[in-house]
Amino acid sequence: MSVFHISAVVFRAAEGDQETLTLVISTAAILCPVTLVLLPLMNYLGMSIMRDVYQLPDQLNKFRLQDAECFCCTHHHRHPETGQELICDRELVYQTLTDSYSPSQRLGSGFKHIFVELSP
Ligand SMILES: [Zn+2]
Ligand SMILES: [Zn+2]
């Protein structure tokens, strides 16, 4: 339904078509509260996403692999429920990075801190 179609219906209602007038009023009665709730909600969600996007470059610049938290290390390499020993993900990541990149290699400037002092 286009804006043109909606305005044609409203004009017909304004000309005195009682049935169309009832349709327009009942549609508005539903759409107005829905819009009043949805618009602020969508605005709030949109602002929250934009805030995250705005903070992303700064977070990437300050990111240090050594400071990243992971499940295995925070649980001392034991599964909290079963008590089973866990492999250290951090060591696997360090090993993969040292295998993949020589110390002289750097990615983009935003990621250079990841590779500084790579040793655990
Ligand atoms: Zn870990
Ligand atoms: Zn670990």
Image: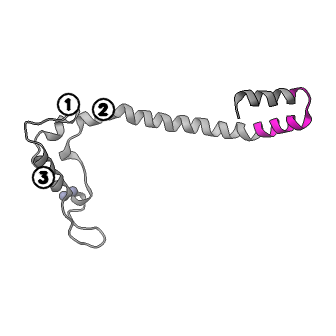
Question: Which mark lies nearer to you, 3 or 2?
Answer: 3
Q: Is residue 61 left or right of residue 54?
A: left
What is the quadrant of residue 104 in the picture? top left
Q: Is residue 66 magenta?
A: no
Mark 2 element type: helix
What amino acid type should be assigned to the residue bearing mark 1? Ser
Q: Nearer the viewer, residue 59 or 28?
A: 28
Q: CA distance from mark 1 to mark 3?
A: 22 Å
Which corner quadrant holds the N terminus? top right
- N-terminal of the pair, mark 3 or mark 2, is 2
Residue 60 position, x and y percent, is 27, 36
Q: Which residue is mark 1?
A: 109
Mark linked to residue 95: 3
Query: Residue at image x 89%, y 38%?
Result: 19
Residue 9 position, x and y percent, is 81, 31
Q: Which residue is mark 2?
A: 57
What amino acid type should be assigned to the residue bearing mark 3? Gln
| Magenta segment main secondary structure | helix
Query: Residue at image x 18%, y 60%?
Result: 88
**Is 9 located above or below residue 96 in the figure?**
above
Is disc 1 surrounded by few (<14), some (14 to 19) or many (20+) residues within 10 Å?
few
